[in-house]
Image (spheres, helix red, strand yellow):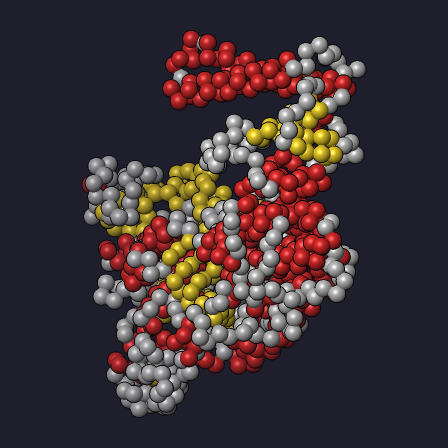
Amino acid sequence: MEKVYDPQTIEAKWAQVWAATPPTARPDAHPFSMVIPPPNVTGALHVGHALNNTLQDLLARWRRMRGDDVLWIPGTDHAGIATQNVVERQLAQAGESRHNLTRDAFIQRVWDWKAQSGGTIIEQLKRLGASCNWEQERFTMDAGLSRAVRAVFVQLYGEGLLYRAERLINWCTRCQTALSDIEVEHEETEGKLYHIQYPLDDAAGAFLTVATTRPETMLGDAAVAVHPDDPRLNHWIGHRVRLPLTHRAIPVVGDAILVDREFGTGAVKVTPGHDFNDEQAGKRHNLPIFSLFTPDGLLDAAGLTAAQVLPECVAALSGQTILSARTQVVKGLEEAGALARMEAHRHAVGRCYRCKTVVEPRCSLQWFVRVNDPNHSLAAPAIEAVRSRRVRLIPESWEANFFGWMEHIQDWCVSRQIWWGHPIPAWYCRGNDVGQCGMKCKEPIVAMSTPTHCPHCGSADLQPDTDVLDTWFSSALWPFSTLGWSGGWPGGWSGGRPGDAGAPDASLLARFYPTSVLVTSFDILFFWVARMMMMGLHCMKEVPFRTVYIHALVRDAEGEKMSKSRGNVVDPLTVMHQYGTDALRFTLAAMASPGRDIRLSPERIEGYRNFANKIWNAARFIQMNAPEGEDRTVEEANSPWRSPAERWIVGRLRQAAGEVNQKLADFRFDEAATVLYQFVWHEFCDWYLELAKVDGQDAARKAATYRTTTALFREVLKLLHPFMPFITEELGQTFCVGGGRRLGDLPYPTAEDFPDDGAGVVFEQWVIAPVVAIRNLRGEMNLPPSEVLHAFLRPKDAVAGDVEGGVVPPPPDFASLKPYLIRLARLGSVTLDAPPPPPNMTASTARLEIVIPISETHRRNERVRLERQRAKLEQERGPLALKLSDPYFVRAPQAVQEKHRLRVAALSAEIARIEGEIARFTGCPQNPE
């Protein structure tokens, strides 16, 4: 073994080995499956990926070692908008544009980019140690997955759950495409609130005042709404107001849904073409829709003219950006005397989740999935699956968010006006354009493959739909499309079954669907998780996964969200290079507390780098103490736990193994990591390896001690392997396995693997606790380790066999424990005999009184120490006792008073004990000098 652990060399070696050879399949074992949340093909590994995939890999390795047949499917998402933006930027750098290319030529450029650079994040995941079934890697635009997408689209359309309609949608003027509601990020922004006066058409001098953050959209107003129960304004319902800067008069309507009578002026403008709530109000009152903006976000002359805007305003506003149009409209309102006032106002502004451009509500012809249809709801089965615990959300606190969102979910806009993505499998008959067809030819032709003619009129002049599907549509099918489903089973659109001609190979699907666990971040709970549940339940008639573990965000050390603008982004690749991948993985696991964001700091990662070094040094120590000719990889059927120290550490190993398995079963990665850290560092390395030195001093026991220590270290490595796979696999080749086997192929330790004869309790009480007490006493008395001490042990109120009562008689084999006490506490002797008369030092454990004779100098030091300790306790007791005597304190709650009384009593008892100790030193000078 090298003297110093070199993570870079070792990790590179094992990452390459694991990527080249898939995990061993176990067809007769219990199946356990996961699908990776597919990262964007444009992406690079960030700290969120590192957390998510570390937790998945931990589960996969643990489950394999527990004997399960694990399938962990990796893959990437084609990421329509993001990927198209990447390639468009490359074209722009070369002075080109996608509009200078044909659509097919541009798509080929994207495929070329994907072939060259699209696998970056997959290679980085392998570097992280992700033990996926890499031979099963999928891409959302693979042929099989593309067929699955078409199949689901055709199925939903045939069932009436997918339709095309002109509705208000979120529009990104930069990406030039529709967005779903959850692709819009809302952020608080400083703006203005404009109060505009709308004159009553039939009441001279009277007007209604409305307040808006967007005065430019008032040109498309279709009504002013007031609450029907508001006595201030409801008498104007049925009247009309003049819309400033236009030739139109618009009605005053009563709407209890839209108007909050307690907020603002009590009157609100209704603009159905530019606000989602107003769109619904427009439908309730049969109002017209005016669209004022072009897809580029510029004011549209045709839209302004249709809205009867004053000609001079049309001329001034046409082609203006939204912000410049706002300035022009405000100026016009001021000149017309219609602007009552402006005031600062903070409000939420929607932005595109990709490019951060302000999103515009815009009326557009799009495809929608009918999600909450009363006759066939896709959302209701998903809600029921969580309520009935067919799908568990961990932590359960996310259930309320899930129900709240799903119960109010809107139809899902699935069409996107970009070129890269799954083409919508719909065609339109052009015969209708020249009057050859009836109304049916206006309906799209939806099919798995390109039709040759119109089924209604026979025309071969068909135009394909130019839109592509939302990226999340294909991702919603990920749990079953990655397992080989590509339409027809078992949902039933074509009636196919496994084994039918042309049916997909369903062997993986039948064995591993539903998947066992999904590990994901809360920020895509509705983007992705909810949609997978709806599609899985609808198409497969079964939930897509049994458990969803939802982890939090990784923030910087101060709790701030990481961002490039703040300069606080932690690059996992840099961290892995600096501290080692195992250190990063263990840090993330140890901090993955459910429901709490992770505050990642370099100091924490450095601490777990030191933990890796500690493990490496322990391995070197064991290796260096190997007797001549010992085979380190020999596994004994029954490890010979012989000495008291060995029996103690085996009991601790039993407890640690039981706790780690239970914590992992409960998805408490943080608690499992803590148990391992405490056991490996403090109990195995700090204690047991020192105890083993005592056992090894006996020449007759040296070989047996080595074999026992090696066997124990094997179990330590196996316990650590899912958390720290690189260092444990490397050491496993030395201490655990031979013949080309891997550590991950060995069974994971369980509590049942190790005996527990109760000897560990005695060992804790008669060796561990006294050694700690004597070491502390040395420190308090400033006694150097080289000074030989003699200790006398006295059991406290010994009552034979009364372990639970806190008293234990001397163990019958105390002679076998003495060597450990002498070496670890650096004693000249230790005895159960009565101690000599004072002066003595004393220490106490839960079970024992420890008496150590001291010299005159040490006696003076001990008295000073005790007096300082008494003074400190008296300093704490004084204010508390004074408070108890304060007549005002009796007004405090009884629980508070009782707490104070108990504390004062405890302090008084401890002070009395210390004074008894001081009395033993009567006559000694208080100043050691």
Quadrant in the rendering for residue 386: bottom left
Residue at image location 51% in from the left, 58% down from the top: 753
The image quarter in which residue 785 lies:
top right
Q: Position of residue 583 (x, y in %)?
A: 64, 54
Q: Position of residue 218 (x, y in %)?
A: 37, 51
For the C terminus, the quadrant is: top right
* 55, 113: nearer the viewer: 55
Q: Is residue 862 visible?
A: yes
Compared with 885, 126 (above or below) is: below
Quadrant (top left/top right/bottom left/bottom right) for the N terminus:
bottom right
Left or right? Give the position of 428 relative to 136. left
Q: Percent x, y for residue 911?
A: 57, 17
Q: Is residue 761 left or right of residue 539?
A: right
The structure residue drawn at horizontal position 38% and vertical position 14%, both measured from the top left corner, is 891
Q: Nearer the viewer, residue 27 or 168?
A: 27
Specify whether residue 325 is in view.
Answer: no
Taking depth in this image into account, of 748 and 516 the one nearest to the observer is 748
In the picture shown, does residue 626 fall above or below 419?
above
- The location of residue 475, given as percent across then percent down, is 45, 68
Residue positioned 44% across, 75% down in the render: 28
How many discs appear? 0
Q: Residue at x 20, y 48 (%)?
A: 238
